[in-house]
Image: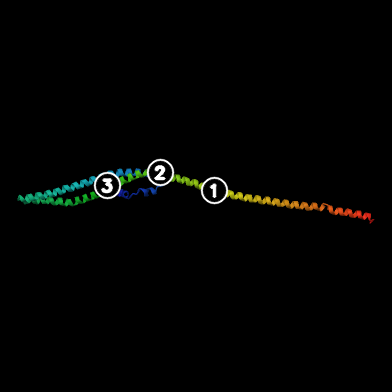
């Protein structure tokens, strides 16, 4: 039966496994629920058809069994009445019914097995639909929480990028401070060197007050002595 092949995967369907494959579980769960409801309607209609077939084959088998028992009873009554020919006719009819009985039994067993499978699929779908309904709000709440956490993670990653940039700026600032300090130190050294040169140069032209007084005193002494 096509319906059994078509819905065989329903028996092993796992809601959580299907949701794990979904890119957006929040949308997937609604879609899956709609699919379940559609499948349930189809399976319910097919199950009713298969169950009707089961009832029909069982009814025909029961009617055949009743006819076999009836032909056996009439054959016995004919023999008791001394009508062997009539008994033979009833037994011939019984043989025809017995040959039909085997095929009817097989049909009834097949119809019963099919009906059992269809009822199992129907019950599984009903259970899955009820389970999904119960889980829908919980799953959606988890999805929203996950999306909120993703946003927080993105903001946090940007914050880490800002911290990295701040560290780079601080490093550059420290480098600039070092360069400025070195330039100031060099300027100070140049100034000291320039001051030292000026001092040496002016000293060259400055008279020594002490030596001039001695020279003046020596000249006066020479004048007194007539030298």
Q: Is residue 81 left or right of residue 211?
A: left
Which colouring convention does the figure follow? rainbow
Q: Position of residue 12 (x, y in %)?
A: 32, 50
Name the residue: 7% across, 49% down. 78
Query: Would you say the residues marked 1 and 2 are in contact, meaning their CB atoms lie under 8 Å apart?
Result: no
Cα distance, mark 3 to mark 1? 63 Å
Q: Is residue 204 left or right of residue 122?
A: right
Which is nearer the N-term, disc 2 or disc 3? 3
Q: In terms of depth relative to the viewer, which is nearer, 195 or 120?
A: 195
Q: Is residue 197 left or right of residue 9?
A: right
Which is nearer the N-term, disc 1 or disc 2? 2
Q: Position of residue 49 (x, y in %)?
A: 25, 44
Of helix, strand and loop, which one carries label 1? helix
Cα distance, mark 2 to mark 3? 34 Å
Position of the C terminus by quadrant: bottom right
Residue under label 2, please give it.
141
Mark identifier at residue 180: none
Q: Position of residue 213 (x, y in %)?
A: 86, 53
Q: Is residue 221 left or right of residue 175?
A: right
- Badge 2: few (under 14), some or many (20 or more) residues near its Cα, within 10 Å? few
Name the residue: 17% across, 51% down. 101
- Badge 3: few (under 14), some or many (20 or more) residues near its Cα, within 10 Å? some
Q: Residue furthest right?
A: 226
User: Disc 2 vs disc 3: which is toward the camera?
Assistant: 2
Mark identifier at residue 163: 1
- Name which quarter of the figure residue 131 lies in: top left
Residue under label 3, please give it.
119
């Amino acid at each position: 039966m096509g319906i059994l092949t078509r819905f065989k995967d329903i028996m092993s369907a796992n809601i959580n496994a299907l949701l794990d494959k979904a890119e957006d579980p929040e949308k997937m769960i609604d879609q899956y629920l709609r699919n379940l409801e559609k499948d349930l309607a189809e399976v319910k209609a097919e199950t009713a058809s298969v169950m009707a077939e089961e009832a029909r084959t069982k009814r025909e088998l029961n009617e055949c069994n009743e006819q076999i028992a009836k032909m056996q009873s009439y054959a016995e009554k004919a023999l008791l009445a001394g009508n062997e020919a009539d008994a033979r006719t009833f037994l011939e009819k019984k043989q025809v019914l017995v040959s039909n009985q085997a095929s009817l039994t097989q049909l009834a067993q097949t119809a019963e097995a099919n009906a059992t499978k269809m009822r199992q699929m129907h019950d599984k779908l009903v259970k899955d639909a009820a389970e999904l309904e119960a889980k829908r709000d919980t799953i959606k709440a988890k999805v929203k929480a996950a999306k909120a956490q993703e946003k927080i993670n993105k903001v946090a990653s940007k914050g880490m990028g800002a911290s990295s940039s701040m560290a780079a700026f601080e490093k550059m600032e420290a480098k600039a401070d070092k360069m400025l300090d070195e330039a100031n130190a060099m300027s100070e050294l140049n100034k000291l060197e320039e001051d030292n040169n000026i001092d040496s140069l002016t000293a060259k032209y400055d008279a020594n007050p002490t030596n001039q007084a001695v020279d003046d005193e020596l000249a006066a002494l020479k004048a007194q002595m007539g030298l």
